[in-house]
Amino acid sequence: MKKNEFSFIGDIATLFSTIPHHGFEPIGDDCTLIELGDDALVMTTDMLVEDVHFLRAASSAEEVGEKSLLVNLSDVAAMGATPIATMLSIALPANAQEEWAEGFMRGYHEASHKAGVALVGGDTTSSRDRITINVVAIGRAPKSNIKRRRDARVGDAICVTGKLGRSSKGLVDIMFGDLNTIAARHHRVAQARITEGVWLGTRSEVHAMMDVSDGIASDIKHIMEMSKVGAEIDTQRVPTDYDLRYALSGGEDYELLLTVDGAHAERLCREFEAAHGTPLTIIGRITEPTSDDVCWMEGEKQVEMDIKGFTHF
């Protein structure tokens, strides 16, 4: 039977579980981390492949450079940490080794400058016909601020920043040749909720957190599995300007998905919006585990939904 992406990752984690981790946390979160006194150093890596994560004909080199950085900084922010440095490796075919490469580095530099993140190493090589980009991002935070997927608690509210579905809708727009919509722009250049993630890291009411890279329907299952809990999501509360399926199953929104002490969730949402000008919306709650699937609701009514998040396999 063909493996899916997440079972493959699970097999890798099992295969390497017997090798000492030397202080690093094992596979399972947006980042691994190692403790440094009262602080933690967090590290993540992500890859972008031409014709999988971006289309050269639909994205400028500068946009690809910016996105390559921000999708990695999003993972750091989702741990409640401040990004401090990256390493960049890139494989370029002959037709992308001059003008395109220069544009890419301009975009990567501009985004790095805005985030205050140093480029401290990497590698370059050639490829046959497609561009492949790999970034390692490093962040730092007080250990008490680190948020993990495994810390959700029964009774927590499930919350999400911003609005969902724009990137998925943007990909559809691009595939139909409409490159100038707001959604298409959002898909080409990701956002990273860095300031918001660091702020949420300081809040003890926030228990589990991750970024939304593969769609709510997929990403909430990571929290369910790691925390050994169930989840109930009210589809009427999911913030989106587009069809609900874009919001639930579309990838690359890079908003933050978090669970919050149920007694303090509404207050936190108000304070978050006052601090950042971005909504934090309660979309459901953490429950006792009943199955591997999300319980989908429309208000008080449970509904059946054939919704699956994005997968690379």
Image: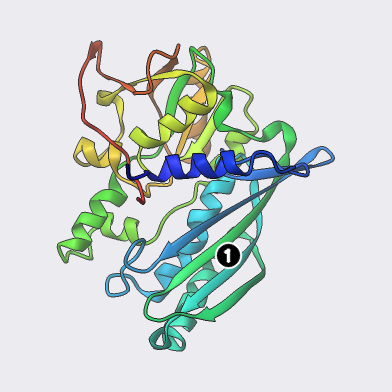
Horizontal and vertical percent position of residue 121: 67, 70
The quarter of the image holding the N terminus is top left
Q: Name the kind of residue labelled 1 in the image.
A: Ser
Residue under pointer 1: 112
Horizontal and vertical percent position of residue 247: 28, 39
Q: 45 or 156: nearer the eye?
A: 45
> Extreme right residue here?
37
> Residue at the spot x=50%, y=46% of the render?
193
Q: 190 or 6: nearer the eye?
A: 6
State left or right for residue 289 relative to residue 153. Answer: left
Horizontal and vertical percent position of residue 24: 72, 43
> Residue at the spot x=44%, y=63% of the render?
48
Residue 266 can be seen, yes or no? no
Q: 216 or 141: nearer the eye?
A: 216
> Extreme left residue here?
176
Horizontal and vertical percent position of residue 229: 48, 18
Compared with 114, 90 (above or below) is below
Residue 63 can be seen, yes or no? yes
Compared with 237, 302 (above or below) is above
> Residue at the spot x=62%, y=35% of the render?
201
Specify the color scheme.
rainbow
Q: Secondary structure at mark 1?
A: helix
> Residue at the spot x=69%, y=43% of the render?
33
> Extreme front residue here?
1
Q: 8 or 200: nearer the eye?
A: 8
Q: How many marks?
A: 1
For disc 1, the neighbor class at 10 Å (few under 14, some 14 to 19, many from 20) is many
